[in-house]
Image (cartoon, rainbow, N blue to C red):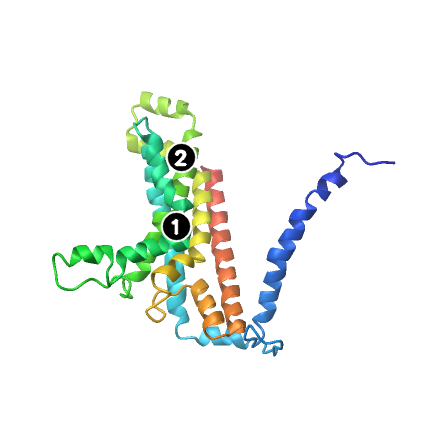
Amino acid sequence: MRMKRNSPFWLNLMYLPTLLLFLSLIYYPFIQGMQISFTNWDGFSQTRDWIGLDNYRRLLEDKNISTVLKNTFIYGVGSTFFQNLIGLAYALFLNQQIRSRGLTRTIVYLPVIVSPLIMGYIWYFFLQYQGGALNDIVLLFQNEPINLLGNPQLNVWIIMLVNTYQYLGIAMIIYLAGLQSIAKDYYEAADIDGASAWNRFKSITFPLLAPSITINVVLNLIGGLRLFDVIVALTKGGPGYASQSLATLSYRTYFGTQDAGYAATLGNVMFVIVALVSLLALVVLRRREVHA
């Protein structure tokens, strides 16, 4: 008996190419990374020795790992906060009937389509100590330029803000879509009751934007916690370890010191942190959607 083309067997068969890509590009490298983290492989030689949990013990004893973890969370949580705050503000502004709304939306979204590495270098040429556009202006008023990217107290926050600037357009578009899906009947009823603009936002807009908030927060957390390109372009993780993230430290460890085993360990820890933080945010925000 011949099976019909629209039978469950044939429909499930359509998933096979995607499954094969997933297994070859994600699952297999992940398993390989786990295995490498238990070895002392240098990334190039044909042999590797099994050393068990030594790389993970080394990570716990690494005096620089606390700075790297702090930076990673600043990039992740800080970018998430500002991208959502500014993105929502833009969405509320552009949801009104104003002139040049389409042009403004395009300008805000435009940085998203630029490569993160290119965006980092654009800001590097603006902020660099020698010959930076900002310091050219500063030198008109004082004798010494400002070393913003070399200041450990500032460069992490500068990187976070550059990342925020580049991707707040995505948050804006998602919030704008959420705002436009809210029925106007709610606002008309609130106007009849004499509700203020703040009360309308607090009681109608914010609760009904819960799905958009969930999407934005989770996406922003994932992107920020694994931030790499902008850091490399602006500071290369320096000075020292001052602006390193787990992603850049893993890269530096692999290619700089040829320590693939420890680099894989750092990558695995980053994966666990991104997964746990994102899942926690997803669970908490999903519960809020239900209550909203």
Q: Which residue is mark 1?
A: 80
Residue 229: give its label: none
Residue 128, percent from left and from top? 27, 60
Looking at the picture, does residue 147 appear above or below residue 102?
A: below
Q: Quadrant of the C terminus?
A: top left
**Badge 2 vs badge 1, beta-carbon distance below 8 Å:** no
Q: Is residue 9 left or right of residue 219?
A: right
Looking at the picture, does residue 47 appear above or below residue 217?
A: below
Q: Earlier in the sequence, mark 2 or mark 1?
A: 1
Q: Quadrant of the N terminus?
A: top right
Q: Which residue is mark 2?
A: 176
Residue 113, percent from left and from top? 42, 45
User: What amino acid is found at the position of numbered circle 2 in the picture?
Assistant: Leu
**Nearest the eye: 239 or 93:** 239
Residue 33, percent from left and from top? 58, 66
Q: Is residue 233 left or right of residue 38?
A: left
Q: Is residue 292 left or right of residue 141?
A: right
Q: Secondary structure at mark 2?
A: helix
Extreme-top residue of the structure: 192
Looking at the picture, does residue 196 appear above or below residue 268?
A: above
The residue drawn where x is 49% and y is 62% is 270
Q: CA distance from mark 2 to mark 1?
A: 17 Å
Residue 11, percent from left and from top? 72, 39
Few, some or many residues within 10 Å of mark 1 (<14, 14–19, 20+): many
